Image: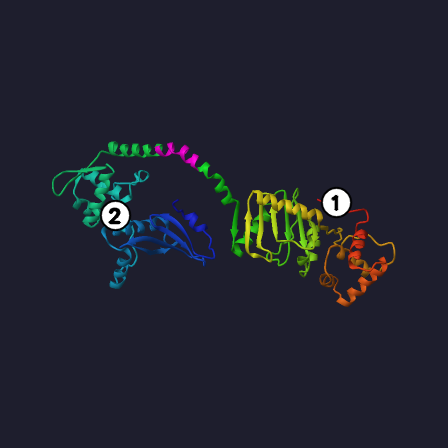
Amino acid sequence: MPLTHAAIRMAKAAEKPQRLYDGGGLYVEVSPAGSKLWRLKYRYGGKEKRLSLGTFPEIGVKEARGKRDAARLMLAEGVDPGEHRKVAKGAGAKGMAEVPTQEQIALPSPTWTRSLEALGVSELEERAYGIVLEQHTATMEDVAAALGLPPNKAQWLLDAIESYGLASHSPERPPRYIAVPPEVAVEALINQRQSGLEKARLAIPKLKSRAKLNVDAEEREQVVEVINSGAVLAQVVDRLFKAVKHEIIGFQRAPLYFPRDSEPVLPGTQAKVVSDASFLEIPGAIESLRHSIEMGEEARTCAVLPFKMLVVDRRLGLINLHSDNMGGAALLVRPSALLDAMCMLFDLVWERATPFVTETSGTLEVSHPSSRLTKAAEQLIPLLAAGLNDKAIAAEMNISAMTLNRRVGELLKHYGIRTRFQLGWHAAMDMYPTGRPQAQV
């Protein structure tokens, strides 16, 4: 598809150079630094070569195409555009260091305007036809003089317009070229183009039948997309959060490569997140969960999660490819059996996870034991129920390991039990004396 000024301007830099192709070997190369350079790929002497045509936007689309067409004319004559530039630079010729445009090679006829582009006729070919029309009959020397071209290039143009049916030549030597009247020649070209388009239209059913044979394979290829760039992954995560309409669910575990800003859950939107022990051990993670719950999110905890995962509206999912890393490689999953499995796994884990509940004040909700306990010992109950280990609890309460052991001992003595497992059970029963709470939307 031909390039436009807007498409080139909006092209963003990536980690590796990327190419935007225009046609005829012409393309724009976007560097990682953001610069945009016009280049021309061509073959000469059986070897592939490249030629720099200037930077965008200093060189616009039209001018770059003119330089491309001029280079192709040199190739038709047997001249290497790259070598031509080197010779011109070595000779110090003013204005010859760059490939000239078509306008520099051939000035347009003042009485001729561009009109046959849609029929596949190039600008120089159309100008040559216009000269033959104006002069009624013309030789190769006449066209070369009028367009300011070498004789062999003028002959190449005359052969081209004759192949289109725009002109014919006499048997004399040198031959004289006679223009075919536009109402005949152009009408014939239009009919040929329409005939070709109709043939293409008739091929649609056959092509569709071939596409149906491979539709399953194509759909499988489009189900998942591997993301290896950390920068691209960060953009995908941001877009997923912005695209949510009804529900967002996910697993979060350490390390946290893309910390989320706690934003209010949009009206009518449900957010559910399960965090494991590795996440809860991150400094500030518990406070972050509290704030998220205040903003409308539902949170639960479990001991271990297999991976990080994010699913939006159960139609787009993101899952890391390595259990300990989501910053390097991930899989974007579209509607499929794989996405259904991700959603089912979340539902199963969510059902078995421990609710992480806060009051509007931001403190963990807990019922008070009937017997007397110190305030410090009471604060341990919701942290034990959430499944935090000793290190995370000590960091959250800002106490030493020795102090933590003393308060745990106080709880063990209070309940009349001996093991930490029993203590966790009694803590959960004290936290939810009426049974497991229902999830709040």
Q: Is residue 209 magenta?
A: yes
Q: Residue furthest left?
A: 172
Image quadrant in which the N terminus is located: top left
Q: Nearer the viewer, residue 334 or 267?
A: 334
Residue 339 in view (yes/no): yes
Q: Assign a secondary structure to mark 1.
A: loop
Query: Which segment did they paint magenta?
Result: 199-210
Which residue is pictured at 23% across the width and 39% down the height? 163
Q: Residue furthest right?
A: 371
Q: Nearer the viewer, residue 126 or 403?
A: 403
Which residue is pictured at 43% across the width and 34% down the height? 209
Q: Quadrant of residue 381?
A: bottom right
Residue type, mark 1 in image: Gln
Q: Assign a secondary structure to mark 2.
A: loop
Q: Which tag is nearer the camera, tag 1 or tag 2?
A: 1
Residue marked by disc 1: 438
Residue marked by disc 2: 107
Q: Position of residue 147 (x, y in %)?
A: 22, 47
The CA span between labels 1 and 2 is 81 Å
Q: Earlier in the sequence, mark 1 or mark 2?
A: 2
Q: Is residue 71 above or below residue 400?
A: above
Q: Position of residue 388 (x, y in %)?
A: 72, 58
Q: Quadrant of residue 283?
A: bottom right
Q: Nearer the viewer, residue 355 or 217?
A: 217
